[in-house]
Image: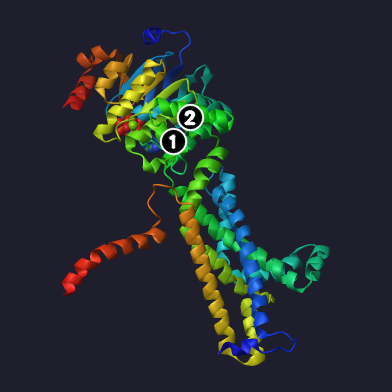
Amino acid sequence: MQQERTVSPADPFPMVVVEHLVKRFGSFNALSDVNLKVAKGEKIVLCGPSGSGKSTLIRCINHIEKHDSGRIVVDGTELTDRICDVNNVRSEVGMVFQSFNLFPHLSVLENCMLAPMKVRGLAESEAHQRSMALLRKVRIHDQANKYPAQLSGGQQQRVAIARALCMQPKIMLFDEPTSALDPEMVKEVLETIVELAQDGMTMVCVTHEMGFAREVADRVVFMDRGSIVEEGDPSTFFRAPNTERAKAFLNQIIH
Amino acid sequence: MFTVLLEKTVDGQRYIDWLVSGLGWTLALAFFGWWIAIAIGVVVGIGRTVQNPFFRALARLYVEIFRNIPVLVQMFLWYFVLPELLPTTMGDWIKQIPPPWGTFFPALWCLGLYTAARIAEQVRAGIEALPRGQDEAAAALGLSGYLTYRHIILPQALRLIVPSLTSEVMGIYKNTSVALTIGLMELTAQARQISDATFQTFAAFGAATLIYLALALIAYQTMMLIDKAVRIPGTAPGREAGGSDFDDVKLESSLPNGMEVVK
Ligand SMILES: Nc1ncnc2c1ncn2[C@@H]1O[C@H](COP(=O)(O)OP(=O)(O)OP(=O)(O)O)[C@@H](O)[C@H]1O
Ligand SMILES: [Mg+2]
């Protein structure tokens, strides 16, 4: 665990390599020349003002958004348009959305079991076992047979995390996992993510929760207007950001 | 009033037997036509929403053709025109099919394909009504397009459209009466035959009307039951079915106040 937290960005086999990434929506450049390396076991917090391209960047990493140019390599596989590559990469990359996006017609347990069985070809008993273990990990195993609509937001988000973990991903992407939650539920979800980080999971998390970033992040990456403007370790970044834009942003979120 | 139905016909049956036989054909048309319509409708509805522009265009073409030509005209096309268009041997073979089946199959085909076009539009609307996050979550888990439709999109979209499918169920069995124009002795045709034979127009068509109404009620209730049975636990009841339940509850609870006002 200790080792993984101190892993250097110069790792010769990074988990994710993003090079000269460009993503346009029409004529608008949502991402312009973004470069990012995520080492195995590294935890990155991505922050920046609204519309700066944070979601777009992590959505490009598992090809939910198609990039226009540049390279994305996930665990040695370059993302091209080849469907089998895309599905392979996606099954190695877990994603947690702001709005949970659980499947409402499936029970909590079925939400977790579906992809392992259909994509990984796991036997039902094995998928069941794995799902229950991970639901226990996020402390929601006693709700396994409920449906998403019967759970609170915090519970739903923890199920979403368990569902992603059931695919045994090599990296987890979080897009503002707590910003759709009532304040009293933020903590339970953040704690779950912190535990995951302590287990050595590689993760990229878009969030404005600074306490969380301080506790977990190896690196904070600050984006503005489609580019990475500044990055650094959390204590330095939050205390003394280099750029004016980061200063302005931090002033805003601290009030 | 309906006693005439119990009288003997020239062929030794009773008139009510004619009605029952007509009802049988009506039900057979509606029932089997419905399954054809659902099967094709779901496939075409999916086709309307897939990425591939060729399949999308094909599905669109199907819907536009079968939904916009009047059922009566479609009935004539299948029965009179199709055998002429086919190679002579095949056309002749079709014309040789003995009476009830020679009209039943074109009518079945016609109603099935017409209703399929209407169902396809409902299916498309249901699919498009789902939040985009569902697609994205499925994709993020590595589910292929097929798996996503099979396990995520269709189960939700079909549940969503159960209330609006009710009117399609009613539509298909009402449209079965069009089959009389090509000579199938279904319910309406039998009613007319009774009316012609007995001059009891009111009794003949009155009985048919009551039967149609009863069928409508059964269809409606069945669809309500299905809607209830497939409802996702924890979600709000559907607008049509549950909405009125909810109003009833509200009405009851507000009644005492209302009565006070009256006093
Ligand atoms: N599907 C889309 N079509 C057109 N423009 C889009 C689309 N998705 C995002 N954008 C634009 O791209 C830019 C970056 O969006 P993105 O969602 O990545 O920002 P963000 O940093 O995640 O912001 P937020 O903090 O509000 O979530 C925004 O200006 C947005 O309007
Ligand atoms: Mg965002």
**Quadrant where ligand 2 appears:** top left
Secondary structure, mark 1, is: loop
Q: Quadrant of residue B147?
A: top right
Secondary structure, mark 2, is: helix
Q: Are marks 2 and 1 in contact (CB under 8 Å)?
A: yes
Q: Residue furthest bottom?
A: B199
Query: The disc labelled 2 sits on which kind of residue?
Result: Ser
Residue B36 position within the rendered picture, expressed as x and y whole percent measured from the top left: 63, 58
Residue A57 position within the rendered picture, expressed as x and y whole percent measured from the top left: 39, 26
Residue nearest the observer in this picture, B24 or A13: B24
Query: The disc labelled 1 sits on which kind of residue?
Result: Ala
Q: How is the image coloured?
A: rainbow
Mark 2 belongs to chain: A
Q: Residue at x 19, y 66 (%)?
A: B257
Q: Residue at x 55, y 75 (%)?
A: B212
Residue B3 higher or lower than B37, as above or below = below
Q: CA gap, disc 2 to disc 1?
A: 9 Å
Residue A176 position within the rendered picture, expressed as x and y whole percent measured from the top left: 33, 29
**Where is mark 1, residue-wise?**
A144
**Where is mark 2, residue-wise?**
A131
